Amino acid sequence: MHSRAPCLTLPDPDATSRFGAVVADVLQSGDVLLLEGQIGAGKTHFARALIQHRLAAQGLHEDVPSPTFTLVQTYEADCEIWHADLYRLSHPDELYELGLEAAFESAICLIEWPDRLGSNTPENALKLSFELTHDGHARRVCLSGNTDLAARIMEHWNG
């Protein structure tokens, strides 16, 4: 089932980190998050918080760099986590070289600049659209797509 899900206002970076931790606790292998928004909207901050929380739950601590230049960073927690930044991709066919299609089935995937996926966008993905608020400090995040996953996230966020 795919329809519009709610929006949240995250007033500061700490709130974005808390949201990342909540989402980390909900995700399962095969979940795909499409992280949209302009540069500086909080996508990488959110992804870093999510990955670090999931690793910490396994007693692991790793630096989580932005995958801007490597395109993909992978992490081993209780399941594999793929963090991809597709900004530099010029054509969706380049996805095959990265191995993302297989990861969509078996890993947690966090995809920045998901518009580069084209027709390869997984149908069950949850889109998180990040935007700066007018004052430039807070972030607004709207969830759409996989309403079941969005509902689980919102239940834990509000719970």
Image (spheres, grey):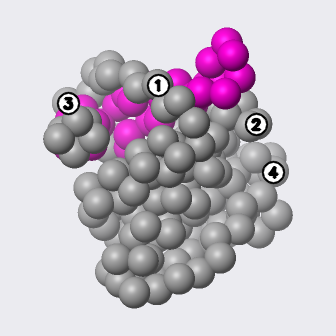
Q: What x and y, as percent, mark residue 56?
A: 42, 77
Q: Is residue 118 above or below residue 138?
A: below
For residue 152: magenta? yes
Mark pair 3, 4: CA separation: 31 Å
**Residue bearing mark 2:** 39
Is the residue marked by circle 1 packed among few (<14), some (14-19), or many (20+) residues within 10 Å? Answer: some
The residue identified by callout 1 is 9
Question: In this figure, which residue is indicated by the disc labeled 3?
Answer: 1
Disc number lying in front (1 or 3) = 1
Q: Position of residue 59 (x, y in %)?
A: 39, 87
**Residue 57 versus residue 27 in the image, above or below:** below
Stretch in magenta: 125-153
Q: Amino acid at mark 1?
A: Thr
Q: Is residue 159 above or below residue 4?
A: below
**Judging from the image, what secondary structure is the residue with disc 1 in?**
strand
Question: Looking at the rendering, which quadrant does residue 139 occupy?
Answer: top right
Q: Which residue is mark 4?
A: 88
Q: Amino acid at mark 3?
A: Met
Q: Amino acid at mark 4?
A: Arg
- Closer to the chain start, of discs 1 and 2, is 1
Q: Are marks 3 and 4 in contact (CB under 8 Å)?
A: no
Q: Residues within 10 Å of mark 2 (few under 14, many from 20)?
A: few
